[in-house]
Each structure stands twice: as structure tokens, then as C-alpha cells.
Image: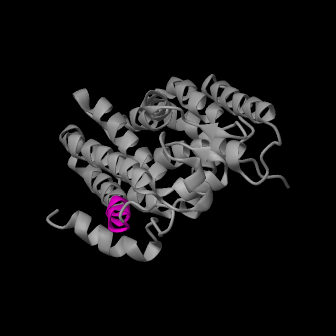
Amino acid sequence: MLTRTSPQDAVATAYDRCRRMQCRHDPTFFLATARLPRRTRPAVHALYGFLRGADEIVDGRGRASTPETRRAALDAWQRALQEAVDGRRPDHPVLAALADAGRRHDMPLHLLETYMQSMRVDCADRVRIPDDQALDRYMNGSAATVGRLMAPLLDARGEGTEPLARLGVAFQLTNFIRDVREDWAMDRVYLPGLDEDELRRGVASPLLRGRIADDVARARGLFADTVEVEDHVPVSMRRGMRLARAVYGRVLDRVEALGYDVLAGRTTVGARDLVPIAATAFRGG
């Protein structure tokens, strides 16, 4: 005897798929999400699931062999989401979850078009961001867009959306600083002004360290300028945001401790670091 799955059960299963995906691929973000109110978490998991799906198209082990086919796959992923938003039953559970989250939380999912423009840059076999203006365009398309999508999930009030967007940029800039070696291994250079001969040799000159120091200072400034975002969200949302800030702040601490030599030392924050980071983030409420 066949058992029919109700639409409610199917959506719940889709949200759980996104939750498990986030837990497996990004435990730090998963921990920060867990600090949000229960009613908000499934939508954050769903947004992560969609963005992760796009990332798999661009960078996953099974990615298509040419930039053109990768871009076509991104277009299809975005088109399938729009069809789900328009009421067509999607084939993929992530799309079902995000379409449902968009309706429940009035998320501006149309902004994902801007996000996808930055992802299309990453479809190239070789990525070089030529200058700071191009870097800003890239981060506005990707990180700032995610901040704007998160705004209704964090119950951001009034003028809180753009500080959240700038906070997203601070996170992504920190990622670019942290991942210089890993990105180079994929033939990508996101931070303008890094000497490719040095990247190839894995030896950081004073000039390269100076550029990284400038980027660290900029990220620090963005984090400082967006502290006000807490004034625009309910108290229940602040602990998760503080944890995320603390984790990324620790990355910048580590880069500074290395003398800005991101080619030689470990810049990532491991699972064992999370407990002391969380204790520091939540000290004093």
C-alpha cells in the first residue's frame, strides 16, 4: 500500500535536508544559526541550502567541465527556484524549502539574480579580480545580497538592512583573507594587488603582507561600523550574530599573529576553537 506524503510533511522533510546540509558543510555557521529563534532557523537552513547548491555547481567535485556549461547550470538552478516561487512543485527539496521560506518570511528572493552574477564570475577556469572597485562589485553581489536576504529572517527593523549587508561584506572579505592559499590552488585571486610569483612560490614579501594588512584593517573597520546592527534586531537574534562576529574576528587575530603571512601559516578556525570563542562572545549576555 502506497503512503501519500502531505505537502506539509514534504516541506518539513525539505527543511531537514537543508539543516543537515548546513551542519555537514558549515558547522560554524550551523552553530551560529542554532543561536537564532527556533521559528527562524529553518529559513536560514533553506537559504544556505540554495547557496550551497549554487556553490556545488561552480566548485563541486561533479561540476561541469567548461565555464559555459557551469553558467548554464547556474541559470537552470535559478530558474527552477523562480518556478517554485511561482507555484510549480519543484523536483529538488532545497528549492521547495526556500520557496516556502520566502513566502513565510517575505524574503526578497529576487535579489538572488544579483547574487548569481557574482557566482558566474567564479564559473571561469581562472579568476582574477583586477581592482578594488571590481572586488566591491563582487562582494556587493554576493555577500551584501546575502545580508539583505537575511534581514527579514533576523527581524531587522527600519534601517537595519544595509548594516546587515555591510556585515556580510566584512564576513566575505575575511574569508578572502583567510583563503588566499586555497583560492590560489583553484587559480583564483580575489584580493587585488597580490603578486602571482609570490603566490606560486608560497613566499610572502613585505608588499604582499602590507596588502593583507590593509584588507585586515578594512575588515576590522567594517565589523566596527556594523555593531549598530544589533540596535535593529530583536534581542533573541543577537547571540547568533555575536558568535559569527567572534569567529571571524578570531580569523583576523590569527592572520595578524602570523605577521599577515597568509601563505605560510594556518589561518582557519577549527572546531576546537569554537567553545572558547562562544564563551567570549556571550560573556556579559
Whether residue 272 is visible to the viewer of this picture, yes or no, is yes
Location of residue 190 with respect to 141 vertically, above or below? below
Query: Total of numbered circles in the picture?
Result: 0
- Residue that extends furthest to the right in the rendered view of this protein: 1
Q: For this view, does 57 lie left or right of residue 131?
A: right
- Residue sitting nearer the eye, 177 or 263: 263
Image coords of residue 84 (percent x, y): 65, 29
Eyeballing the image, is 42 above or below 262?
A: above
Q: Position of residue 5 (x, y in %)?
A: 71, 47
Q: Quadrant of the C terminus?
A: bottom left
Majority SS type along the magenta span: helix
**Residue found farthest to the left:** 284
Relative image position of residue 22 (x, y in whole percent): 55, 56
In this view, the residue in front, 8 or 125, is 125
Q: Is residue 274 above or below residue 6?
A: below
What residue lies at 36% left-to-right and 66% top-to-bottom? 254
- Of residues 63 and 109, the one drawn nearer to the viewer in this rendering: 63
Q: Residue drawn 57% across and 44% down?
A: 189
Q: Could you tell me which residue is drawn at 52 percent across and 54 percent down?
A: 180
In this image, 180 relative to 166: left or right?
Answer: right
Q: Which residues are magenta?
A: 250-258
- Residue 211 percent coordinates (x, y): 39, 47
Determine the image quadrant of residue 248: bottom left
Quadrant housing residue 107 = top left
**Quadrant housing the N terminus:** bottom right
Is residue 39 among the parts visible in the rendering?
A: no
Residue displayed at 28% across by 35% down: 163
In this picture the colour scheme is: one colour
**In-image side of 242 versus 151 (left or right):** left
175 part of magenta stretch: no
